[in-house]
Each structure stands twice: as C-alpha cells, then as structure tokens.
Image (spheres, grey):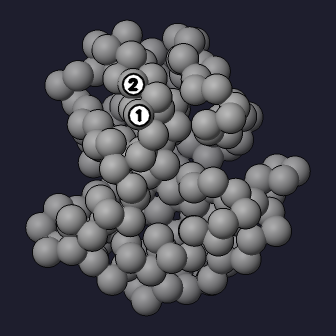
C-alpha cells in the first residue's frame, strides 16, 4: 500500500493483516480521489472503519486540513498511529479506537461537521446503510459535503437518505464505491 498523490506521493503505508482488515486497492483509491478532485483541499475528513488509514492519509496528502480516524480494532489503530507518525501528521490527525456507530452517536449534538466522510465497513454485514442513516440523522456532513462509501458490490445502498443523494457509483470487481452529496440537485450518474 502506498500514498498515490500529493505531498506524500509514493510513500509506503503499513497495512493490518488480512484477518483484521481488507485493504482498499490502490486503483480503487485512485479512482475515488479522481472523482472527488478539488474537494479535499482544506477539508475536515472522517475516516470510519479506517483499517490502515489509507483513505484519510491520502486526503491529508492531497491537502485536507484534518482527519479523524475511527476503528474499533486495537491493532488497526496502532498501525494508523504508525502511519500517521511516519508521515509526520500528528498535528493534523486524531485517532479514535471505538465502534463507528458509537463514535457517530457521540456526535449527535451536531456541533462537529465534516466535509468528507469515508465509510469502508466490513463486507457482507449490511453496515453501510445504517451508518449512512446515522450520518444524516446526526447532521455530521457539512452543507456541501461528500460521503464516500466503499461496499460489497452485492450490497444495495439507497439512492437517497434524507438530504444525501447518490452522486456516482462505480464497481471494481467485488468492490463498489458510492459517492453521496448533501445537495439535492445531483442525480445518479
């Protein structure tokens, strides 16, 4: 695993063992960041089910102001910490070792907003839809924010959840990426 572009381009990342987390392939991450080019600069990012932290670290490399990494696995949060420290990004990062739903529940007062949320839960558990609903209900995504959900291609995600609308969806083998926006004028492409 490596950082694809930006300040830390080509820097290698440590990844957790496959028994713990499924790393996102570089080509999928590259496609995601091509689709959201222009949104990362100075953004506040939330990386849920972080694993190695690759999505959030890529965003930081591309100019994001801050990223909060959330994963409930001790080994994963240790690897995220190693990756963050290896890139010297301690001042622009926060790492939370807790369940994603529990973390979102702690934000339900609506005081903390994110410009970009990456959601990459374990496949086959149907978690994406429930987390989408929580993010919308707790008003965590900023007014012009993006939510990028990586999920199993067999998992159906809704085209609309409250004020979140599906903007783009693309499949890469067993992996699909669905990008949601908080603006109703966008439609499925």
Quadrant containing the C terminus in the rendered view = bottom right
Q: Is residue 92 left or right of residue 170?
A: left
Instruction: Name the foreground residue: 8 vs 1.
Output: 1
Residue in view at x 80 percent, y 63 percent: 153
Residue 122: where, in percent of width, then height? 63, 54
Visible residue check, residue 71:
yes
At mark 1, the secondary structure is helix
Distance of label 1 from label 2 (alpha carbons): 6 Å
Vertical comparison of 51 with 114: above or below: above
Visible residue check, residue 176:
no
Q: Are marks 1 and 2 in contact (CB under 8 Å)?
A: yes
Instruction: Name the foreground residue: 132 vs 160.
Output: 132
Q: Which residue is mark 1?
A: 74
What numbered label is drawn on residue 78? 2
Q: Which image quadrant for residue 126?
A: bottom right
Q: Is residue 144 left or right of residue 53?
A: left
Residue 44: where, in percent of width, then height? 27, 48
């Amino acid at each position: 695993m490596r950082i694809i572009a930006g300040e830390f381009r080509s820097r290698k990342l440590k990844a957790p063992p496959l028994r713990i987390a499924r790393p996102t392939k570089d080509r999928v991450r590259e496609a995601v960041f091509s689709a959201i080019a222009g949104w990362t600069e100075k953004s506040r990012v939330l990386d849920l089910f972080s694993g190695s932290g690759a999505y959030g670290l890529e965003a930081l490399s591309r100019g994001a102001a801050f990223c909060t990494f959330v994963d409930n696995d001790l080994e994963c949060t240790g690897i995220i910490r190693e990756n963050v420290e290896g890139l010297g990004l301690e001042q622009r990062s926060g790492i939370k070792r807790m369940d994603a739903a529990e973390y979102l529940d702690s934000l339900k007062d609506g005081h903390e907003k994110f410009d970009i949320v990456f959601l990459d839960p374990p496949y086959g558990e149907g978690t994406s839809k429930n987390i989408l609903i929580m993010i919308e209900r707790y008003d965590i995504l900023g007014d012009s924010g993006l939510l990028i959900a990586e999920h199993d291609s067999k998992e159906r995600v809704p085209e609309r959840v409250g004020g979140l609308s599906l903007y783009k969806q693309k499949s890469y083998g067993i992996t699909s990426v669905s990008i949601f926006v908080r603006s109703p004028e966008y439609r499925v492409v």
